[in-house]
Image: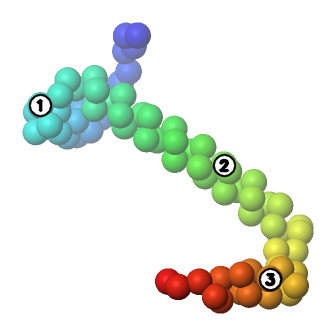
Amino acid sequence: MKVAVSIPDSIFEAAEQLAKERNIPRSQVFAEALSTYLELRNSESVTTLLNEVYSRESAKVDEALIKAQFDATNHEAW
């Protein structure tokens, strides 16, 4: 899909240079950058939600579970 956007000259020039260095179309640089940004935003929202949950709920692990995990791995060769 084609879109028209306005960006600062310095960002355009940096993207143009990167496209030349990587020998890829400029539109691919922008598509990859936007994709990375969207993934980061999604990751941040998940982290925010988890932080909210753990601020209300205890994150303490039951001692019996800790012992069971330790006992289960204690006999393995690492």
Point out residue 73 in the picture as x, y percentages from the top left corner.
65, 83
The tag earlier along the polypeptide, 3 or 2, is 2
- The answer to whether residue 70 is above or below residue 8 is below
Is residue 22 shown left or right of residue 58?
left
Local crowd at mark 3 within 10 Å, few (<14), some, or many (≥20)? few
How much space separates mark 3 and mark 1, taking CA atoms?
54 Å
Q: Nearer the viewer, mark 3 or mark 1?
A: 3
Disc 3 is placed on an element classified as helix
Taking the view exactly as shown, the residue that stands out farthest to the top is: 1
Image quarter (top left, top right, bottom left or bottom right) of the N terminus: top left
The image position of residue 58, as x and y in percent, is 87, 74
Q: Does residue 71 appear left or right of residue 62 in this picture?
A: left
Residue drawn at the location 60% of the way across and 43% of the way down? 42
Res 45 label: 2
Q: Amino acid at mark 3?
A: Ala
Instruction: Return the residue at label 1.
Output: 23
Q: Which residue is mark 3?
A: 68
Q: Nearer the viewer, residue 47 or 78?
A: 78
Q: Which of the two discs, 2 and 1, sits closer to the camera?
A: 1
68 left or right of 41? Answer: right
Q: Quadrant of residue 53?
A: bottom right
Q: Earlier in the sequence, mark 2 or mark 1?
A: 1
User: Quadrant location of residue 36?
Assistant: top left
Q: Is residue 58 left or right of residue 30?
A: right
Q: Nearer the viewer, residue 55 or 75?
A: 75
Q: Residues within 10 Å of mark 1 (few under 14, many from 20)?
A: few
